[in-house]
Every structure is written in structure tokens, then in C-alpha cells.
Amino acid sequence: MTVVIRNVLLLRIARCILIASPLCTVEASTSVAQNVAPPPVVATHPPVQPVAQPTAHPAEDLFLRLGKVGLDPARVYHVRDAHIDRPGLYLTLEDGTIGFTQDILGRATGALFEGEGEVLVFPPDRAERSSLALFTGSAILEEKISFGYVRFNDGTYEDLKPHLKPTADATAFLSKWTTQAPDWAAADAFRLLETYAALLPSSEPSHEPAREARQDRILHSRLFGAKLGAFDIFYDSLSAEQVQVLQLTQAEGGSYYDIWMSFTPKARGSDPTLPQEVGPDAFEIPSYKIQARITPPHRLEAEATCDLHIVREGQRALLFELSRYLLVTGVEASGEPLEFIHNPSVTGSQLARQGNDMVAVVFPRTLKAGERITLKFTYGGDVLSEEANGLLAVGARGTWYPNRGLRMANFDLVFAYPPEWTLLATGTRTGADEIRPDNARPNATRPDGAPLTPEELHSRWISSRPVPVAGFNLGRYVKATAKAGSVLVEAYATGEMGLAAPKVAPGLASAPGKNLPDSSRPIPPFSDPSSPARNVQVVADRAADAVTFFAERFGSYPYGSLALTQAPGPVSQGWPGLVFLSGYAFLSPEELASRNLRPADSILARQTPAHETAHQWWGDLVPWKSYRDQWISEGLASYCALLELEPEDPAAFRLVLDNYRDDLLQKKGDRRMSEAGAVTLGQRLNSSRFPLGYDLIAYGRGAWLFHMLRQMLRDDATLASQHSKSASPPSNPDALFMKILLSVQEKYAGKSLSTRELLDEFAARWPKSLWFEGKPSLGWFADSWIQGTSVPIMELKNAKILHPKDATSATGTIVQRDAPYDLITPVPLYAEVPGKPLVLLGRIFADGPETTFHLRVPPGTRKILLDPQATLLRQR
Ligand SMILES: [Zn+2]
């Protein structure tokens, strides 16, 4: 699995900020608390100056100027006691020299500072504090700086003017920095284009920028700190998380953007534990029609027609994610060509060298909120490769059509492809494939050189309900089918494993359904005779069993059918109705054993069909709201696969859970893997310190968090039955846990789910025996366990049975060690009575390092036991 490296451009440009897959970075589509954003800052824009001379490509020209602007020799000053403050961050230029960049559209958009300064940023919650501490050793950022390169789109220059004086150092300053300054400009060109496109010549009479446009403020500072070296601080008023501090770091496996902090300053009165939730996107794409021609083994050509719904007033440049390997040849709105910016238009620039996965579309006028527009993109490129005989890697899997990340949309897909291949896609196949003359390749030949019938198949796939992502897979497959009630489940595999991971942009490989059965160790070479095709029926049957198991608990299967299709490499992804399944998942226990996997990893490999099937509900039907909530999908899919395993093999269930815990406790240097960060950091967890942090935390800790919630609810059911007349064990101790998950599905199907919303659903039904401080709120769980990173040691101290003759009560102290001082844990205590099964006494909230208790216990109690069934994520 490729590690996450994503250029700053992408990080900042997409509203979906942050790292990793565009598919991991969903934001709220509706109803999210815009009202929790800090008070709007009204920027002091200078007067608008129209562009003097229109050119054939005004947006591209503007983009190129923004991306290579240099210093203005006439504007170098001495600066003293100047403050550049934004909500949540404070930058002070105490004493030094500052040079501003040349005007673009009559504005200064940047400055370079050398001298003495300081920066201060306070992270707002536990997860961000521990993230910052991981990278810097301190829970606040307070750093002396000697250099800063800043870009802005507001009145920063005007604000600084009162602090500027002429300087005698201008010549030396310019000779030192003039050549280098343009190199730093490219990183913000896309984002500045978004702002300044509004000033390009318009097809409509010019007017004042809309209110929202005036609140568009960015400040990107590239700083050099005395202790921390070079790092970047972004403020972006329109971004999902307005303040972000990161550092480009070289480490094992390549380069990383370590994100030290990312947050929106909290509004007064908001929840102090979890991050601010994100607001609506700048525009929505409710539906797509895509016609694609696939010519294996490499080529994809497509026309994608997208219906757009404009949300934010005043935009002229809209940004889409699209693979850098696809060349856009045209973008039209209602038949009129639009200017667009994609890699090839900036040949030779830093952008082209880095590559990117963005396309900007620039409109000839300002767009209005509520407007509906239809855009047609025409593009093509080599995004496929044949990794083994008949086994294709579909690269650009999530960026083969222009999108805004993981968002609900309806898809109408038509694929043309050669008849010797089998194609599966998301959605429901409409009727039989049509056979048409293949005009694109009249002289095609088979691999053996024989002439090929110049025909192609056309198949059409329509989504039966909005889905967060659409895609396809094709190969020369062997097929097996199974039924889960009325749901058709198909598995498709080839006779070879194939080694390569899909060719995708770094950091773009992940999606709902990613599962790495063995990502931490090198993959053995596939020179053995393993054949996924041989076990294809087993996979179909396993997935059908999983569909049945989950449908009984989480509501009926959401899509028409389910196809599990082999994909090369170790990564699997569960998309709506279509699973890309690693060859590992097709291997028999014997074949897996021959690969020297740990026993738990072999179990996980065989569980992959169930894990990916669980994503049909958790991830596809109910997607995560932002990258911070992706752990819900991975934790739940992992845990649901275990739930299915538990009745048939409880020892395997336990082994996998214990393995997740042991992996978290493994040391990397002087730190435990659990210290990679909180589950809510999402793919930020893959950092230079912990290149595989995301897998261990989102899957391992994520599954454990659901295990803890479930076990608390089981204990409540047990206590209730102990107090009932029959005193028999509960017939279905998981009833409440399953009921809550079903209610989450019913409430959030077709929407998206945040961590806060998930916890609210649990709190709404949280039983009184588990209330903390007299309240059903799970704020303590959010703060201690979801935002926390610890795997504590828990022990009993001074446990005593009082009145030894009748043994009616017990006292003692619960000790939490290797844990934050304020960790809160509901600890189950049991009584050991000779000749009887263990008796659950209840859950005691351990609050901090030591918590004393005094409990009634059954007569004859010999001993008090702490969590003998290992229901808590703790060291053993
Ligand atoms: Zn998954």
C-alpha cells in the first residue's frame, strides 16, 4: 500500500482538505452546523481593478502568474511589531525585513520576511494536542521564527503598512531572495485562482463581489522555526478545517506531510471534546451520466456529464478531483466551451512536475447560489494495467470521473469494452449487453495474433439509489454465483494473483472497504501455484452468508446485487454492489498458511469478503461525514466481520481482537503504535512517525471501540436479567447494541454520519446502569477513548470482602496506569463464588488513576475480579 503523500495544493484546495483519498474526505451535504463557525471576518479588499487586456486564456494566464510571482523590488521595507492574526493563530513579525510580491490584478498576494518573529497556535482538543505533541514534543505551538513566506488574498498588505519603514537592506535582501521567491509561489496558485477568478473579465456587468466571496480569506505561511525547522501554517476561512499546521518530512518509505494540527476554532458553547463539524460544500453534484470506452490493457476514454447545484454565492472557478493520468480535452456548459486548467496546460511548471489530481473549471461569469448547471467533461488516459493474465489493475479508481470526494450522487454509466473481457460496475445492470461494431479498433488481434471480431459490448449500469462513489472492474474471469435470499452474489477471479497495487496517485488509493490483511510485512512473491479462480465459489458463498447475516441485523441489502471481483495487490475495497477483492481473500487456508502469515492475519484474509460486504451498509449506504469519521466505517466493518465469525469460531474472534490490541502495544522506537493518534485523525495517522498508523488505529482501535460499547450494553442486559424474577441469562444480550446500529442505518442511510451523530444515537438509548454522573451522554467515551490514544493498565488494589461471615460487601480501588490522569472507564467487576459461575457485580466508572468502590456482593464471595472477560482495550 502506497503511503500517503499529498501535495500542499491538494491539501488546501479541495474543500475536503486533508490528505488521503478524495473518498475519505466527505463533508456534510446538508444540515450541518454552519452556525458554529467563528464570526465572519470581513476582509478589507482594495478596490477591484479589471484586467486590462483580455487574452485567449485569461484564467490560465492568471493561474500561471499567481504560481510564479516574484518579489517587487520597489516594496522592500523594515517591519517592526506587526501582527498577522487569524482565528486560532497568531503570527508576530517583531523586527526584520519584508518584501512584497509583484502586484497581480493590482494586488499584493504575498510577502517574504526575514528577521525575528514568533508564531503561536493553540490546539483545541485532546486529539489535536497529542498530535502536536507527537511531532513537536509540546502541546502548544510557540516557536521563534527567522523566516516566513506568506500568501494571502485579503488586505494583509494594507494591514501591515503602518508597521513598515524604508530600509537600507533592500539590495542585500533582494539579491538573496529574488531568484528563490517564485519557486514558493506555485503551491497556492489554485487556491488564489479560486479567489481572483472573480476579477477576470466577465460576460456579465461587473458588480461587487458577493458577501460570501468577501469572506474568502486565506493566509498560507511557510515558516522557518528555531527549533522545529521549516513548517507550514494555513488559515482558510472557506476550508472544512480552517487552521492547519503541517511539515514535509522525509522518513522511511518516502516523504510525508505530517499534519501537526487541523481544526476550526471552537465556537463558544460548542462540545469541547469532539472537533467542529464541517459545513456544506461549495457545490454539489447530484447526478452523473458517464459514457466510457475501455480498451484493455491501458486505455480509458470518457465523457462525463455532471449536474451541478451551486451552493456558495460568487464563485467563478470550480475545482474537481480528477486523476492526473487523464488528459482533459474539453469542458462544456450547455454546449459552450469553458476554460479549464489541468496538468498539461502548465507544462514545465512545478505543478506539472509534481502532478496533481485537480481540474479547475472557470466560468465566464459569477455563479449564483441555487443555480443549476450541466457540465460535460471529455477526457482520456492510460489508467489501467494488466498485472497478470486477464487481471487488470484499475488505476484512478476513485478519480476516473470529476468529483468532489465521497458525495452521494446518482450514476448512469455506459461502458463500451471488448467482448473477451467481463465488466462489472456499481449500480444495476440494465438488460443484456448490446453488441455493436467496434469502430475504434477495426484491425484488432487476439493475444495469439488471430484476428479479433471488431465488435464491442455496451453495458449500462444505473444506481438504484444515490451512492458515494461509482466505479468498474474488468478482467477475464471465472465466475461463481450464490444467493442470499433474493440477492444475487457473484464472485469473479482469474487463475493468477498479480502483485501490483493499482496505479494511482500517491495517497489516493484508499476508499471505503480498504483492508490490508498483512500490510505490515513484505508480501511473498506470487511465484507459487495459488489460483484465486480455484476458490471463487467459496468467496461467493462467504459473501452470501455475510449478506444474510448483516441484512438480518442492519436492514435489507441496499443494492440490487453484489459482485466481488478480483483485484491485484493486497488492498480490497467495498464499493456499492461492487467489491475489488484482493487475491488474498480467494486463497484457501492451506495457501494462506504457506505464506507465513500470522494466524490472526490468515483469519482476517479469509474474513475480507465479510468485511467488504459489511461496507455495503457501513461506508456505502451510510458514508462517513469527514475524514475524521472514516474510522466508524473501518471499525464497524472490521467488527461486523468478527460478529459474523464469533458464533462459529469464538476462539478466532478472540484471537483477532487480541491481535489488534497487541499490534497497538507494539513499540516503534520509544513509542507504542497506539500513540500514532486518535481514531478521529483519519488518514493523518499515516505519518513519518507511524507510516502504517491508519491501519492499526482505524481498524484495530476502531473495532475495539465498538467491542467496548457492545460489551457495556451486554453487561446492562445481564444485570437486568439478574434482577428479574427468573434470574436466567438474557436470551439476546446483543439486542440493544444491534437495535442502536439499526437505528443509525435507518437515520443516516443515504446521508453521512459523524462521530458525534453516532454517539448521540447510542446516548439516546444508553441504559441507566451505564450513565456517568447521572447523564446518558457519552461525552466521557468521546474524550477518553475516541479522542484518546491510551491502552491503559488496569488493576485492583486493596480489594477486601467485608463481614467475612456473611460476605455481603466488598471494597477496593481500581487503578488505571499508563493512562492520562483524567481517563474515564466503566470497569466491570465480578464476584468469584466457589462452585458457581462468575457473577457480574456491575460497572464502576474508574475516573483517573485511583477510584475506590464499595459494592454489595453475593454471600460466599471469595474474590473480586476486574474485567475477566477482557471487554476493555487495556494491557493484559
Ligand atoms: Zn474496510
Image: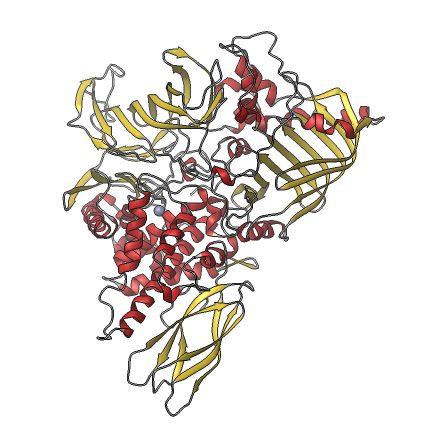
Location of the C terminus (image quadrant): bottom left
Above or below: residue 841 compared with residue 15: below
Q: Nearer the viewer, residue 294 or 830?
A: 830
User: Which of the 4 image quarters holds residue 161?
Assistant: top right
Question: Outermost residue toward the right?
Answer: 168
**Residue 226 x, y percent position in the rendering:** 72, 44
Locate residue 59 relative to residue 599 in the image: left or right: right
Horizontally, residue 140 falls left or right of residue 687, namely: right
For the N terminus, the image quarter is: top left
Q: Residue at x 28, y 45 (%)?
A: 746
**Residue 140, position in %: x, y?**
64, 50
Occupied quadrant, residue 858: bottom left
Question: What kind of colouring is applied to the model shown?
Answer: secondary structure
Q: Is residue 90 left or right of residue 671?
A: right
**Residue 242 location, x and y as percent?**
55, 37
Q: Is residue 160 left or right of residue 488?
A: right
Horizontal and vertical percent position of residue 455: 20, 19
Q: Is residue 725 above or below residue 657?
A: below
Going 55% across and 8% down the picture, which residue do you hit?
55
Residue 151 shows in this picture: yes
| For residue 809, above or below residue 100 | below
Q: Visible in this render: residue 592? A: no
Of residue 773 and residue 408, the one placed in the foreground of this image is 773
